[in-house]
Image: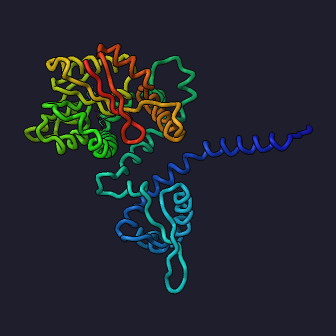
Amino acid sequence: MAFTTNCSEESELYHAQIHLYKHVYNFVSSMALKSAMELGIADAIHNHGKPMTLSELASSLKLHPSKVNILYRFLRLLTHNGFFTKTTVKSNEEEETAYGLTPSSKLLISGKSTCLSTLIEGALHASSIDMWKSSKKWFNEDKEQTLFECATGENYWDFLNKDSESGTLSLFQDAMAADSRMFKLALHENKNVFEGLESLVDVAGGTGAVTKLIHEAFPQIKCTVFDQPQVVGNLTGNENLNFVSGDMFKSIPPADAVLLKWVLHDWNDELSLKILKNSKEAISHKGKDGKVIIIDISIDETSDDRRLTELQLEYDLVMLTMFLGKERTKQEWEKLIYDAGFSSYKITPISGFKSLVEVYP
Ligand SMILES: C[S@@+](CC[C@H](N)C(=O)[O-])C[C@H]1O[C@@H](n2cnc3c(N)ncnc32)[C@H](O)[C@@H]1O
């Protein structure tokens, strides 16, 4: 068979192949990052106080000599991907490469409020990865269920709740809390959103990471973290930081403001409407002065930042496959907000890829 292509066809073909291979092997970069987190490479460099050579790093990580070259190969990819820097240092008159931290790998330093290691652990947990082997079956079955349910036979929330011994519920809550602690900066930049409030209920607020930040910044606000009994049942707060258990689909404790951070994206429109209507009821005693504060992604497919949009669309598939939830565009938010009976809203982009939406009755 004759196979002839002209130059531009060839180049297009090669680009297409690279594009396809890049997407096929993206998981290797994710897993190399997870390995770096598990090994504690960022902690080792941080504790050393300055960039480390390969041998210093291997000895600090207590690696077997046979693994030093393997560490080098991981570092090479991770450095290329922006997680480590490379500088040249002199040791015993010889020049050697030393690896330092970048802003991204600093997010792996344990004990810091900005540490995102548990998010990596949660997002790349076997339970979230294994389900993808059933995606063909999922597409072919005429059942309203998540990919997770199709693969495992159980709902993700039930899986989290029943499996307390394996620690998946606390891993999930820790991952959420890690993300929430990053909210500090956004809170500082958007103080006006919370000023003047006397009370706030953080609905489905997990173990209260965001509420604790709000309580720190505004100690006079009466804050309530509202979540399921298995999440908040054993937690204790203080006079102005209260933990209450219940079901947001039934009713929400009254407050001047309801906070819904990373909640509505877990649910389809019908269930999100229910949560929003219950939130409206919870702030009703304040008349027009009450508000609902939503923190979630607002997908912007027109953004010039393709990586940001890709991340938002990836999150959308995570929500779809785990919960039958969704990330929403600005138009979808608007429809949901007005359908729930609110009269106006204001969207402010925060922390790069999420938005803060203030919703008024
Ligand atoms: C994605 S997490 C978000 C946690 C927290 N807002 C944050 O951003 O860190 C969703 C939370 O919804 C809670 N949740 C699920 N169903 C609930 C219900 N029916 N009533 C109250 N909370 C619920 C879960 O326990 C979980 O803590």
In depth, the one of 282 and 62 nearer the eye is 282
What residue appears at the point 86 percent right and 41 percent down from the top-left corner? 6
In depth, the one of 234 and 314 nearer the eye is 314
Furthest residue in direction bottom, as rendered: 93
Q: Tell whether 13 sits left or right of 246.
A: right
Image location (x, y in percent) of residue 332: 43, 21
Image location (x, y in percent) of residue 99: 48, 67
Image location (x, y in percent) of residue 19: 66, 43
Q: Is residue 167 shown to the viewer in this render?
A: no
Q: Tell whether 205 sits left or right of 80.
A: left
Q: Tell whether 156 sits left or right of 207.
A: right
Image location (x, y in percent) of residue 95: 55, 79
What residue appears at the point 19 percent right and 22 percent down from the top-left corner? 289
What residue appears at the point 36 percent right and 29 percent down from the top-left corner? 347
In depth, the one of 56 and 155 nearer the eye is 56
Furthest residue in direction right, as rendered: 2
What residue appears at the point 28 percent right and 38 percent down from the top-left corner? 190
Q: Is residue 202 above or below residue 39?
A: above
Furthest residue in direction left, as rendered: 239
Q: Is residue 75 above or below residue 290?
A: below
Q: Quadrant of the N terminus?
A: top right
Q: Is residue 139 shown to the viewer in this render?
A: yes
Q: Quadrant of residue 209?
A: top left
Q: Is residue 113 above or below residue 187?
A: below
**Ligand 1 image-quadrant field:** top left
Q: Quadrant of the C terminus?
A: top left
